[in-house]
Image (tube, grey):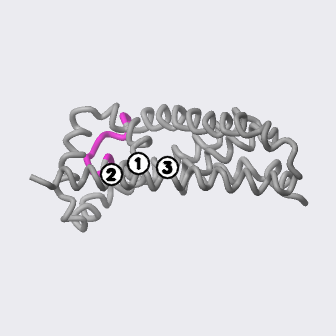
Amino acid sequence: MDINSLISHYGYAALLVGAVAEGETITLLGGVAAHQGLLRFWLVVASVALGGMIGDQVLFLLGRHFGGRVLRRFSRYKRKIRSAQRLIQRHPYLFVIGTRFMYGFRVVGPVLIGASKLPPKIFFPLNIFGAIVWALLFTTLGYLGGEVIGPWLHHLDQHIKRWAWLIIVVVAVVAVRIWLKRRDRRKADDDETP
């Protein structure tokens, strides 16, 4: 079985599991696979939305039951945690939907929301809506990335083409993550400086 057959047969399941665990990278790769015709665009969106929703729902429930204990272990971030909890209380709808898009909050955001005791009847529909918007956005970005680079890769040997796609997407995602981390560090340094 070649890589294209594996993606076609197991791609949706891999996307669902990957979106539970990680998120953006797997979603971008799903968009690229949809562009290549290996997967269907809307099924990629549905798979990663479901995976992202399940992951955040589990983290929310963990936050509701164990959040207080977990957050006490991060006493050096007490000020930031309090600030996030005030935001959750003032703007729960925006925070629940937006936490999925905030770099560094992908895992801790739902735990904070759960620990803030936001009712599940509010979190659940917002989680679904946020997961769909997030999945649609990142799948589309992956698809458009495939659209831009596709013509250039069209004439390359099939094996080089597959590796080039993987390398380009991984490098792009790593570069964006490094940039976001540096930006967050600079902001944190600016916030700590009197």
Q: Residues within 10 Å of mark 2 (few under 14, many from 20)?
A: some
Amino acid marked by disc 1: Tyr
Q: Disc 3 vs disc 2: Cβ atoms closer than 8 Å?
A: no
Q: Helix or strand or loop: what does disc 2 sit on? A: helix
- The residue identified by callout 3 is 176
Amino acid marked by disc 3: Val
Query: Which residue occupies 63% across, 33% down?
Result: 140
Query: Which residue occupies 35% across, 50% down?
Result: 183
Q: Disc 1 vs disc 3: Cβ atoms closer than 8 Å?
A: no
- The residue identified by callout 1 is 103
Find residue 51 and report its horizontal and vertical position in percent: 58, 47
Q: Nearer the viewer, residue 177 or 113?
A: 177
Q: Helix or strand or loop: what does disc 1 sit on? A: loop
Relative vertical location of residue 64 with respect to residue 151 in this rendering, above or below: below
Q: Which residues are magenta?
A: 113-122
- The residue identified by callout 2 is 184
Relative vertical location of residue 178 with respect to residue 142 in this rendering, above or below: below
Find residue 167 and report its horizontal and vertical position in percent: 68, 56
Question: Whole-Å distance between the Cαs marked 3 and 2?
Answer: 12 Å
Query: Which residue occupies 39% across, 52% down?
Result: 104
Query: Which residue occupies 68% across, 40% down?
Result: 31
Residue 170 sits in quarter: bottom right
